Amino acid sequence: MTTSHWILAAIAFLPLLAGSCGPAGEAASEPAHNTLSDEEIAQGWELLFDGKDLSKWRGFRSEEPPAGWTVSEGTIRFDADHGGEGAGDLVTREQFSDFELQLEWKISPGGNSGVFFRVGEQSEQEFHSGPEVQIIDGSPEHYPDLEDTQRVGANYGLHPASKDVVKPVGEWNHLRLVVNGAHVEHWLNGEKIVEYELWTDEWKEMVARTKFAAWPEYGMNETGHICLQDHGAPVWFRNLKVRRL
């Protein structure tokens, strides 16, 4: 083969090489959403959502998911057009005591939601017992008067996030929640942004200065349900997994 033929053959091969290393090749190596790797299984992780159904979820004080909560394109979606605030939050069928939770969430423009933990059904409402990791579109045009304890990632009403690492509305954010005895950590997009201790004198004094003082069980449960909040706006969740500690 002449030198010119070698050059032509090499040029013809380049697109094939690029295809094997480009986005398609990278996507093939990424784990599928709503699945566990062999390593995660060995570490004790459990899926809370397989991308297909809500079999591990139900309504608060109800055996069926409330109106508006659906499975859509591999996500748990709250559709305000078919639900609306007051339709009801989604809770895990199982209860969890000490655990690590990971999930991804995406909020709609002007949207509001949250993730509660150790929710007890002896209380009239979910937020009467379970502390909340705040999820919200905190942009000034939608919420101009938000306090720091009401912004994304905060322990709602009590502990503000130490830094702003939230991604723009419409993009996926990764939440990691660690609850081990009295110790709680909120991680957002790989950064620890909140850390606190339940049940201490400091905790009780902080609660006493908020609306939660009306409910003595607030933040005091040692076990309970994980809860996704209906706040009347579209929100999406995927890759929900939990590991018991």
Image (cartoon, helix red, strand yellow):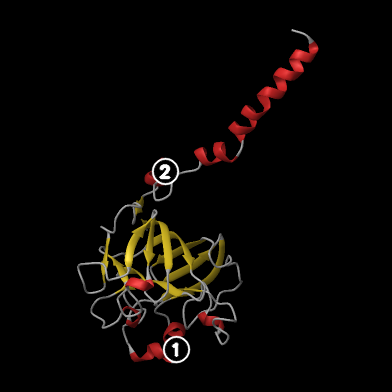
Distance from label 2 to label 1 (Cα)?
43 Å
Q: Tell me if residue 96 comes above or below residue 124 in the rendering.
A: above
Q: Quadrant of residue 17?
A: top right
Nearer to us in this view, 71 or 102: 71
**Which percent across, then down, holds residue 192?**
55, 65
Q: Quadrant of residue 216?
A: bottom left
| Res 223 visible | no
Q: Tell me if residue 121 comes above or below residue 179 in the rendering.
A: below
- Which residue is drawn at the image coordinates 32% and 80% (left, top)? 86
Residue type (three-letter) at the residue carrying disc 1: Glu
SS of the residue under disc 1: helix
What residue is disc 1 on? 205
What residue is disc 2 on? 37
- Which residue is drawn at the image coordinates 73% and 19% (left, top)? 8
The numbered mark, 2 or 1, whose residue comes first in the sequence reads 2
Say left or right for 86 vs 137.
Answer: left
Which quadrant of the rendered structure holds the N terminus?
A: top right
Residue type (three-letter) at the residue carrying disc 2: Ser
Taking the view exactly as shown, the residue that stands out farthest to the top is 1
- Which residue is drawn at the image coordinates 39% and 77% (left, top)? 232
SS of the residue under disc 2: loop
**Which percent across, then down, holds residue 91?**
30, 68
- Which residue is drawn at the image coordinates 32% and 52% (left, top)? 52
